[in-house]
Image (tube, grey):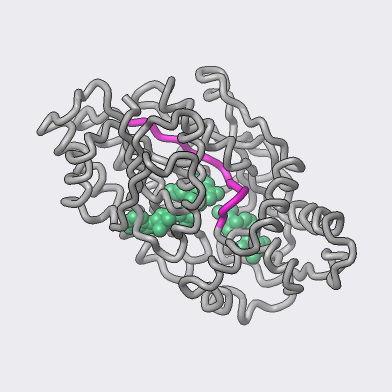
Amino acid sequence: MNRNILVTGGAGFIGSNFIRYVQTQDPTINLVNLDLLTYAGSTENLKDLPNPKNHHFINDDICNQVQVENILREHQIDTIVHFAAESHVDRSLKGPDAFIQTNIVGTFSLLEAARKVWLIEQKQNKDTVRFHHISTDEVYGTLAPNDPAFEETTPYAPTSPYSASKASSDHLVRSYAHSFGLPITISNCSNNYGPHQFPEKLIPLVILNALTGKALPIYGDGMQIRDWLYVEDHCEAIWAILQKGKIGESYNIGGDNQPPNIEIVTTICALLDEANPSSEYYPHSQLIKHVTDRPGHDRRYAMNIEKIHRELGWQPSVDLREGLQKTVTWYLEHTDWLNAIIKEKGYQNWVEINYQGRENQ
Ligand code: NAD
Ligand code: TYD
């Protein structure tokens, strides 16, 4: 098991970090990376892999079930780690269609391919294969200030087209375990940050805007709470689940870091001030601007991570200040990456769609 891994969405943020992480753990593992290269995916994220020889990139859609079946047979895939998704809540509010297609239909296509090749054709020993599905804490909905953190048994209550589509995909994955005996695991993770994150998400967007003297848009009062996790910690947790996780189980993954958004943004400003005291935008916090809130904005997420700690011995190792420092440093040292990414695939167009017309609050 875990010799020939199919990673879907491996040219995106977390998937590309995962490929890098696996290659540092075991460079002999064969990694097949199936990615459609949507606006969020880029081969820029796959430069400098520790062992490019054992990474095979295929530019295609997870909805192409025949292609997925062929990949499973041809590469004798024993493990699928399924990251590919439309992942941005704001985009799901402007155009939900792609979320339904990739997150629901795409997951269904992968499950069907796995059922056919692994369980019906029995191309692999069905006791050693694994379908690991990457999901989110957002499936649990939103918390009031004093509510306990989400547990694996918390009922699903998604609120956006993004979280509803991820919840649907989780249900489909569980149904394939229950109905067909497909060996699955699921992880539900909180907000990730770190190198290679597309600058539509809060942390890289704030870094990019601060570097270029643009407004740092805070939705509403900025007191919304997320549970931030450094991306390498997420990769380590997924690896622990692949090695030691119990078939059929879900694991919550989180960072035990729950500051309000405004605190994340002021910390990034302080780190940029330290890194560049002679910047014309110093102090960078002068760029903060409160703007119209996201419709239906979930107020608070928090993850109870006792299960993965107790059963698999995993806990986050990077605290928020250290993680933000590493992230800011990475972006400062990779302006070529940032420039290449924002030139690709309509980034400015998205910025206009999402931010034009938001009033100052
Ligand atoms: P991302 O948007 O950076 O990357 C998604 C990748 O999937 C891109 O490379 C894209 O090209 C690819 N893709 C999209 N549609 C595809 C399709 N139809 N076929 C093949 N490839 C396709 O996303 P991310 O932030 O790396 O998130 C990865 C996974 O982790 C997602 O499933 C997401 O729901 C989940 N997740 C993300 C976070 C987070 O904070 N980013 C937190 C928890 C869970
Ligand atoms: P985001 O990074 O989009 O992740 P998610 O919506 O999956 O949590 O947003 C993180 C938080 O930051 C969320 O509460 C929305 C907020 N936010 C802003 O205040 N301004 C922004 O420009 C963006 C993109 C997000």
- Viewer-proximal residue, 54 or 294? 54
Residue depicted at x 39% and y 26% = 249
Q: Is residue 328 magenta?
A: no
- Name which residue lies at 57% across and 66% down: 295
In the rendered image, the vertical position of residue 273 relative to residue 54, given as above or below: below
Tell me: 297 left or right of 85. Answer: right
Residue drawn 45% across the image and 27% down it: 241
State the residue at coordinates (46%, 46%): 15
Q: Quadrant of residue 42?
A: bottom left
Quadrant into which the N terminus falls: top left
The residue lying furthest to the bottom in this view is 357
Query: Where does the image place residue 217, in percent across and percent down from the top left?
Result: 70, 68
* Numbered circles on residues, count: 0
Q: Is residue 361 left or right of residue 115?
A: right
Q: Is residue 196 magenta?
A: yes
Give the magenta-colored segment's residue range: 184-197
Q: Give the quarter the ligand 2 occupies.
A: bottom right
The image shows residue 209 at horizontal and vertical percentages of 70, 68
- Closer to the camera, 173 or 59? 59
From this viewpoint, is residue 162 visible? no
Q: Which quarter of the figure is the C terminus placed in? A: bottom right
Viewer-proximal residue among 140 and 1: 1
Q: Is residue 350 visible?
A: yes
Residue 156 is situated, as x and y percent measured from the top left of the image, at 45, 42
x and y, in percent, of residue 262 in the image: 76, 56
Q: Is residue 132 left or right of residue 331?
A: left
